[in-house]
């Protein structure tokens, strides 16, 4: 009886070794892919948390800057269901003073993202004429947004002091002449392969400015006032 391997035994051994190698490679590949996906999800979560942190900080810093134009007194705050523009007391270090913050949606390459535009320093005459500050920066907060809605808590001008606050999808500082009691942002966005939903509600501490801090009357025409409403 020969002490060597037969051809059949050798083929069986090679087949078994090949199967083991394939199984090990498949397990390694699955582990690597799981790690990659886990890392991507962690980065997406970190990005979402950073966006929430920035939104919260900027909304909390909302300042009721009061302007006067052609006898009209109003607070610079213009909020719609998908866009919001207001004055922030958290100014940029390189510009100083107050900042104008605008949140808006922008479509690029078929994808809609949530962006924030920061302009500083803020001058009353620039706001009236619809001119941005000297330092303007645009940053994308969320790259893929399926749905986004802003809402504002408050009540219309009324003599009834017991009237309840209500959520509305529009807040015009020219009409209300103060900031809303709270701002809510609800959005649905893609986080990796899964759509997730968030809702952020931020109370506003200072809704009206002391009369001695109101901006002095500034010159401005009606066209500038119309630009102020519509400019992003």
Image: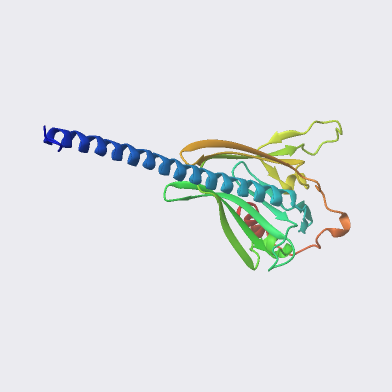
Residue for point 41% across, 44% down = 32
- In the figure, is residue 38 to the left or right of 99? left
Residue sitting farthest toward the front: 1
The foreground one among 9 and 103 is: 9
For the N terminus, give its image quadrant: top left
Q: Is residue 222 left or right of residue 193?
A: right
Q: Determine whether, in the image, residue 158 is placed left or right of residue 135.
A: right
Asked whether 26 or 162 is in front, the reply is 26
Asked whether residue 232 appears in the rendered view, the answer is: no
- Give residue 148's position: percent from left, percent from top: 57, 40
- Residue at 58 percent across and 47 percent down: it is 46
Total labels: the figure holds: 0
Residue 223 lies left or right of residue 19; in this view the side is right
- Location of the C terminus by quadrant is bottom right
- Which quadrant of the figure has residue 167? top right
Q: Reply above or below: 40 against 5.
A: below
Report the front residue among 51 and 154: 51
Name the image quarter holding residue 98.
bottom right
Image coordinates of residue 29 in percent, x first then y, are: 37, 42
- The colour style of the image is rainbow
Q: Nearer the viewer, residue 107 or 222?
A: 107
Q: Residue 4 at x, y = what percent? A: 14, 38
- Tell me if residue 26 comes above or below residue 123 in the rendering: above
């Amino acid at each position: 009886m020969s002490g060597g391997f037969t051809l059949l035994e050798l083929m069986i051994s090679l087949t078994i070794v090949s199967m083991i190698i394939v199984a090990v490679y498949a397990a390694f590949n699955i582990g690597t892919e799981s790690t990659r996906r886990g890392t991507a999800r962690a980065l997406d979560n970190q990005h979402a948390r950073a966006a929430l942190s920035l939104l919260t900080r900027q909304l909390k810093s909302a300042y009721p800057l009061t302007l006067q134009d052609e006898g009209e007194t109003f607070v610079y705050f213009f909020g719609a269901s998908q866009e919001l523009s207001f004055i922030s007391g958290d100014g940029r270090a390189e510009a100083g003073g107050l900042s104008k913050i605008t949140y808006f949606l922008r479509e690029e390459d078929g994808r809609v993202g949530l962006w924030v535009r920061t302009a500083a320093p803020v001058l009353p005459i620039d706001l009236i004429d619809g001119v941005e500050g000297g330092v303007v920066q645009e940053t994308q907060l969320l790259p893929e947004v399926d749905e986004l809605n802003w809402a504002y808590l408050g009540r219309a001008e009324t003599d009834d002091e017991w009237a309840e606050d209500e959520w509305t999808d529009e807040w015009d500082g020219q009409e209300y002449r103060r900031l809303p009691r709270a701002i809510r942002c609800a959005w649905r966005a893609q986080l990796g392969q899964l759509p997730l939903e968030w809702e952020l509600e931020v109370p506003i501490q200072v809704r009206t400015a002391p009369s001695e801090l109101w901006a002095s009357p500034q010159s401005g025409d009606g066209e500038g006032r119309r630009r102020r409403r519509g400019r992003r």
